[in-house]
Structure formats: C-alpha cells, structure tokens
C-alpha cells in the first residue's frame, strides 16, 4: 500500500517524511559519539592495565622512530630482552632541565652479557659476536670528548645496556652518566607507533 494519501479534491498530499529520516543526522551523531566513547574507554583500559602511551622527543632512534611519534608501550609483566625498543627514565639523565623526560632506546644486552663497541669496525659485539643491525641509521663514528666512554662492559645482573639506532646522535649507555641501566627504570617496551597515521604499525 502506498504512503501517499488521496485528498477529496483529487490532489495528492505531499509524501510524508518519516520522523526517523528527519532525525537521522541526530541518530548518526549519537552512534558516532557512542563509538568514540567506547574507543576512548578501550584506550584508557589498555593504558591502565597493559601499558601506557608516550611521545618521542628527539632523533636518537631514527630511522625506527621519529620526533613526535606517539607510542604504545607494554608495561605490565614485561621483562627487557635483547633487541627490544624500550622507554626508560633514569634520575639525573639526561642532565637538567630534561632530567625528568623519559628516553627511548634499543636493548643491546641484558644482565651477564659482555658488550664491546668497536668504532674501528663500526660494530657492536655481544659476548664476542658482532650484532647484525639493519635498523641503524648510519655507520658509527667515534664521538671524542663527549663522555661516551662506556664501550667495553659486562652488564650487571638486573640491568641492561641500551643504544640509539641513530648512533651518531644518541646519548645512551656509552655515556658515563647513563651506562648500564637498572631494569626497574624501564617504563615498558614499545609495541607500536600510534601517531602519525603515516607511521602507524608495530616496532621491531
């Protein structure tokens, strides 16, 4: 049966527009708002129960990470492993006024392993074996006079040795003010880049 109504004079009444159609934009807005709220709740739960979200400052992890990247970290139940990209905060490093800022680096060695940084071969050795490092930005050069002298060390148990992927522009465990880092200073492992969307994806 048609929705049109015939008038007594033979003219047709204009087709009725259902109330639902007239308010469809309101329904769309309601559903989008509801979806956004659910996403935000999900993110809050992830950040609270699993990890946290943190931003990158600086270029020490180029090309893996870039200044301004927003990262999702795994914190709960995490134990650092060789090769992981981690965020850490060690009191007094970097020097003031940035000393409260977390830093992001790659785990090169864990407790009990022996690390040697050899600029003559532009290689890093762990327990005498040169690491295969396709992630580094460029060949390492010796940064003379910059207190980057922790180059041959056995990592204490419960600690890690970390380096930036952009070795020539990174203050890391080579720096005497940082050196090996107690695992308790690690905030978490970088799981993925969340923003910008052009860099979205897992971090290896």
Image (tube, rainbow, N blue to C red):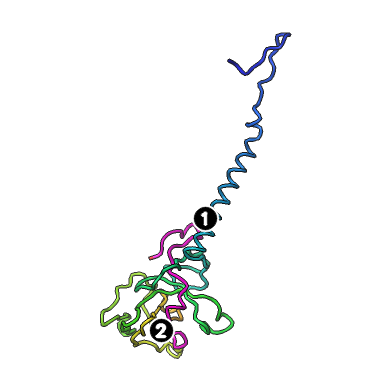
* Figure check: 111 above or below 78: below
Residue occupying image coordinates x 46% and y 66%: 73
Residue at 44% from the left image edge and 62% from the top image edge = 192
Q: CA distance from mark 2 to mark 1?
A: 36 Å
Q: Which mark is residue 159?
A: none
State the residue in front, 8 or 64. Answer: 8
Mark found first going from the N terminus, 2 or 1: 1
Identify the residue position indicated by label 1 in the image. 42
Under circle 2, the secondary element is loop
Q: Quadrant of the N terminus?
A: top right
Residue 193 shown in magenta: yes
Compared with 9, 148 (above or below) is below
Residue in view at x 39 percent, y 88 percent: 150
| Left or right: 21 as drawn, with respect to 140 | right
Q: Quadrant of residue 136?
A: bottom left
Badge 1 element:
helix
Q: Position of residue 195 (x, y in %)?
A: 51, 60
Q: Which residues are magenta?
A: 175-203
Residue 82 falls within the magenta-colored stretch: no
Q: Which residue is mark 2?
A: 180
Q: Quadrant of the C terminus?
A: bottom left
Residue located farthest toward the left when viewing the structure as drawn: 129
Q: In the depicted view, which residue is nearer to us: 165 or 72? A: 72
Q: Could you say where residue 138 lies in the image, as x and y percent from the top left?
A: 38, 74
> Measured from the top left, where is residue 6 in percent x and y?
68, 12
4 to the left or right of 101: right
User: Would you identify the image quadrant in which residue 74 lies?
Assistant: bottom left
The residue sitting at the bottom extreme is: 145
Residue 96 pos. (x, y %): 57, 84
Label 2 packing within 10 angstroms: few (<14), some (14-19), many (20+): many
């Amino acid at each position: 049966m048609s929705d049109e109504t015939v008038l007594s004079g033979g003219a047709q009444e204009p087709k009725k527009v259902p109330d639902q159609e007239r308010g469809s934009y309101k329904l769309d807005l309601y559903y989008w708002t509801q979806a956004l709220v659910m996403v935000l709740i999900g993110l809050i739960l992830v950040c609270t129960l699993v990890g946290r979200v943190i931003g990158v400052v600086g270029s020490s992890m180029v090309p893996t990470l870039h200044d301004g990247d927003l990262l999702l970290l795994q914190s709960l139940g995490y134990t650092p492993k060789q090769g992981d990209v981690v965020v850490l905060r060690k009191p007094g490093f970097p020097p003031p006024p940035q000393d409260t800022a977390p830093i992001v680096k790659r785990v090169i060695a864990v407790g009990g392993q022996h690390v040697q940084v050899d600029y003559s071969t532009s290689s890093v050795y762990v327990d005498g074996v040169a690491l295969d490092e396709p992630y580094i930005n460029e060949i390492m050069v010796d940064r003379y006079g910059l207190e980057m002298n922790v180059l041959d060390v056995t990592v204490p148990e419960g600690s890690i040795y970390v380096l930036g992927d952009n070795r020539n522009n990174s203050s890391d465990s080579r720096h005497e003010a940082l050196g090996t880092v107690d695992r308790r200073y690690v905030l978490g492992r970088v799981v993925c880049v969340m923003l910008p969307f052009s860099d979205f994806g897992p971090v290896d």
